[in-house]
Image (tube, grey):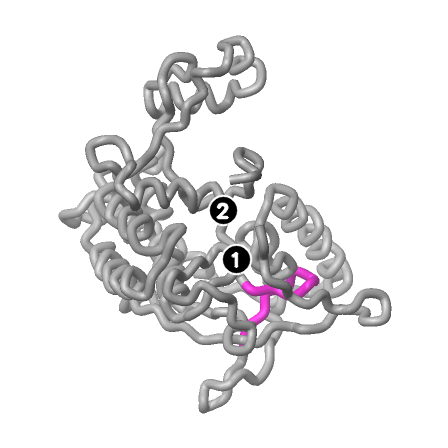
Amino acid sequence: PSAKDLASRDVVSRAMTMEIREGRGVGEKKDHIYLHLDHLPPDLLAERLPGISETAAIFSGVDVTKEPIPVLPTVHYNMGGIPTNHHGEVIRTVFDDKGDFVEDVVVGGLFAAGEAACASVHGANRLGANSLLDIVVFGRACALRIADIAKPGDKLPELSSDKGMDSVESLDKLRFKEGTISTSEIRSEMQHVMQDHAAVYRTADSLAEGKAKIDSVIQKLPDVKVTDKSLVWNTDLVETLELRNLLPCAATTVHGAEARTESRGAHAHENFPDRDDKKWMKHTLSFHDEADGKTTITYRPIHYYTLDEEECKVVPPVARVY
């Protein structure tokens, strides 16, 4: 309350969600709230908030100088990603026969940086400047590492004559789908499951229910129907490809959250409101099998040390107070 509109976005999102959950939402389904900007002078809105004004007009048909904007908390940034080391090299975790961690192994020649990657330098929070850190700092780190391990003129492995055909086949498999459910229907169902069961506030029951529901939604993807069969400006195909990627992300999010019986960062668990460093100071690893739609969860330890302990010691985690 003291910070008001200067509060961090996760705090604002929780306050918005609380209003909706307690029955003060608006609209036919009472599932959103209104943001009022109409108390501000029109010339000030045009000068300082032209983007918001335009977005509200395009997507909601709202004139922000006269009407409130319908708003709902949503996902801004995925705080996980492809695991990498500080060079941007993708790492693969090796486990023993009992499922215990053995080591992290670099996947030779594969790099990731930006929102797709998880270099684990942020703790549990993400802000705009951190996005730049992700892509600028680690993009540069990738380039420097590649310069170290690869030289101009190095001999490359021979490629088989059909290399890349599996990607073409995968594309065509979706493009010629003649199922009974549209991409938009499956996507909408996925969105509602995530909003209802894995959004800002989470409980053991809602996560367990969400886990079952998202697994059920994934089983519908093979029955998707792509209407446009062309290869020119095919938004139907692009949205279906995006959906194919979104569903595993949704499943890994819900499965990982349901298993983590604590609250940490953006993961606010009502049944377990406190952070539990003794049990949960570790990374969640999610594996999704496209063949059967199953998602499995395991873990890898964190690196509780810096690259140079003499220069900079580890900063111990503290309770987040507001």
Residue lying furthest left in this view? 180
Say if 281 sits above or below 184 in the image: below
Amino acid on which the number 2 mark rests in the picture = Asp
Residue 310: image x %, image y %? 85, 71
Along the viewing direction, whichever of 224 and 204 lies nearer the viewer: 204
Q: Report, in whole angstroms, how far the alpha carbon at label 1 lies from the one at label 2.
A: 9 Å
Say if 204 sits above or below 31 in the image: below
Label 2 crowd bin: few (<14), some (14–19), many (20+), radius 10 Å = many
Residue 211: image x %, image y %? 29, 63
Compared across the picture, whether 151 is left or right of 44 comes to right
Compared across the picture, whether 144 is left or right of 162 comes to right
The magenta segment: 83-93
Q: Residue at x 49, y 75 (%)?
A: 299
Report if residue 89 lies within the magenta region.
yes
Residue lying furthest right in this view? 310
Asked where in the image residue 68 lies, by quadrant, the reply is: top left
The reply to whether the C-beta atoms of the residues labelled 1 and 2 are less than 8 Å apart is yes
Amino acid on which the number 1 mark rests in the picture = Gly
